[in-house]
Image (spheres, rainbow, N blue to C red):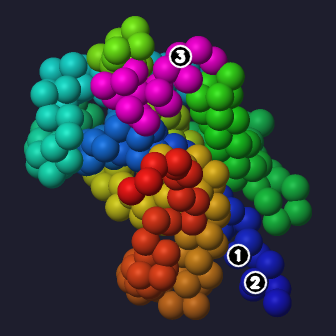
Amino acid sequence: MTAVVNQLPIGLSIAAVLLLVALGLTVTFGQMGVINMAHGEFIMAGAYTAFLLQDLLLALPAAFVVAGLMGLALERGAIRHFYGRPLDTLLLTWGVSLVLQQLARDLFGAPNVQVPAPSWLSGGIGILPYNRLFIMALAVAGVAGIWLYLTRTKLGRRTQAVVQNRRLAATSGIDPGRVDMLTFFIGSGLAGLAGVALTLIGPVGPALGTYYIVDAFLVVVAGGLGQLRGAVLAAVGLGLLNSYAEFWSDASLAKVLVFAAVIGFLQVRPQGLVALRSRALT
């Protein structure tokens, strides 16, 4: 029982990291249909931004802007020509991810670097370290921010209109291209925030994003494409499952068990935890 209780904060912090990573994919993949394999490199960019600034609070907005601008450049430069062709976007962004990883090696070197946590995050409350509590709070703030943006702002409602029916939204006076730019900027910026959070629990390296990108896609798919509530539930479930599976076995077997669990779940409920409600007849 003690081991079960001690693994709980680890599982919740893994869930928070997965949720931060998956939030951006929920927007770009779940809502826009773009399979962005370079999303992991935006995480890496956010982590290296924290490494360069050496100030957590300053790194959070800076990483959001840096990763967001990288995503915006990718969307305007390449992805906008491949909307409606998800497999093409997968191949395109996979190539971009390799280029960005090599660029990071050229700029920062191949060895991992460490970002020291601020002194005010040392210690903890009971079995919950302050750094993991901060990551959880950051994930909650990210979810709240995305929810408020999509449901309480004019730009968010325009985003939802473009997602539901692109052509109808265009005939209603909404510029889909502008919405695409803003959506990709926000989704990529969230990946940058995830990168800053990851510096609190481990070293930073050129391949940092590759360790989380597959799990993040699993969260989005298991939660339901484009469904924020589903992403939250899936992230918590997969985070806890990964934590306890790794405790009772090892890291490699835990990944296999999580992947098998998601495949089994999708066989029963292919639409994910939360399905998009529609009045369509077909």
Image position, residue 84 (x, y; %): 20, 40
- Helix or strand or loop: what does disc 1 sit on? helix
- Helix or strand or loop: what does disc 2 sit on? helix
Q: CA distance from mark 3 to mark 1?
A: 40 Å
Q: Amino acid at mark 1?
A: Gln
Crowd rating for badge 2 (residues with CA inside 10 Å; few <14, some 14–19, many 20+) = few
Q: CA distance from mark 3 to mark 2?
A: 44 Å
Q: Amino acid at mark 2?
A: Val
Which residue lies under the disc numbered 1?
7
Crowd rating for badge 3 (residues with CA inside 10 Å; few <14, some 14–19, many 20+) = some
Image position, residue 199 (x, y; %): 51, 44
Q: CA distance from mark 2 to mark 1?
A: 5 Å
- Label at residue 155: 3
Name, please, the residue furthest toward the front: 281
Find out whether the residues at labels 2 and 1 contact each other: C-beta distance under 8 Å.
yes
Q: Amino acid at mark 3?
A: Leu
Q: Residue at x 36, y 45 (%)?
A: 29
Q: Residue at x 21, y 19 (%)?
A: 76
